[in-house]
Amino acid sequence: MNARYPLRLILLILMIVGGLFSVAWAETVFVQAKTAKLRSGKTSLDKVVADLQYGEALEVVKTEGTWTEVRTRSGVTGWIFASKTTTVKPSGGGDDELAKAGRLFKGKEASDATASAGARGLTEVSGEYAKRSGISQRDRDTVDRMTAYKITDQEVEDFLKKGELGEYAK
C-alpha cells in the first residue's frame, strides 16, 4: 500500500498542473457588438443571463455551430452568438468616447455626431476626397443625412428579430 501512495501523489500533482495549464491556455474572445446578450442556451429564445458590454473579455468554454459558450470575468457562463465576438480586442469604446476626443481635438463644442465623425477623420478629409472622386453633391448630402440618423440599440435588435437575422436566424 505504501508503494501506491507516491503514485497517487504524482497523479494528483499532474492533474493540478494540467488544470492550471488548461486555464492558462483558454481562448479569450471580446464582445465586438454594441449590444450582446449572454443566454442560458443556444437560441435567441433562451433566457438572458447577462448583458455584455462592447470590448468585454470572455473565456471560451466551447463552440457549437454559430454559438459559443463563454464565461465572463465575474464567472457567469452562457451562450453568445459567435459573430458578436472577435479574437482581437476592439480598440476604444463607443461613440461617446469618440465624441469627447473629437471635441477636445477641435477645441470647441460640437454635436456628438459631428465630433464622432471628426475623431474618426470623416469630415473635411472625406468631403474633399468625395469631391475629387466625382461623387455628386446629392450623394454626399445623402450620406450626411444617413450618418446623422440616430437608431437605438433596441431598434437594431427588433430589426434583427423581425428579419430573422444574426442570432435570430432560424
Image (cartoon, rainbow, N blue to C red):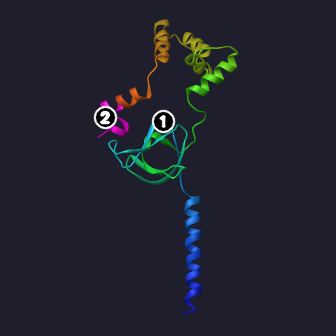
What secondary structure is the stretch in magenta mostly built from?
helix
| Residue bearing mark 2 | 164
Secondary structure at numbered mark 1: loop
- Residue name at image x 65 percent, y 18 percent: 103
Q: Is residue 10 above or below residue 42?
A: below
| Residue 47 picture location, percent across and down | 36, 45
- Residue name at image x 54 percent, y 42 percent: 56
Q: Is residue 160 magenta?
A: yes
Q: Say which mark, if any, is on residue 33.
A: 1
Based on the displayed image, in which of its 4 quarters is residue 118 positioned?
top right
Q: Nearer the viewer, residue 111 or 133?
A: 111
Query: In the rendered view of the protein, which quadrant contains the N terminus?
Result: bottom right
Q: Is residue 108 magenta?
A: no
Pick out the residue farthest to the left.
170
Amino acid identity at mark 1 = Ala
- Residue name at image x 55 percent, y 18 percent: 113
Region rendered in magenta: 159-170
| Residue 137 picture location, percent across and down | 50, 6
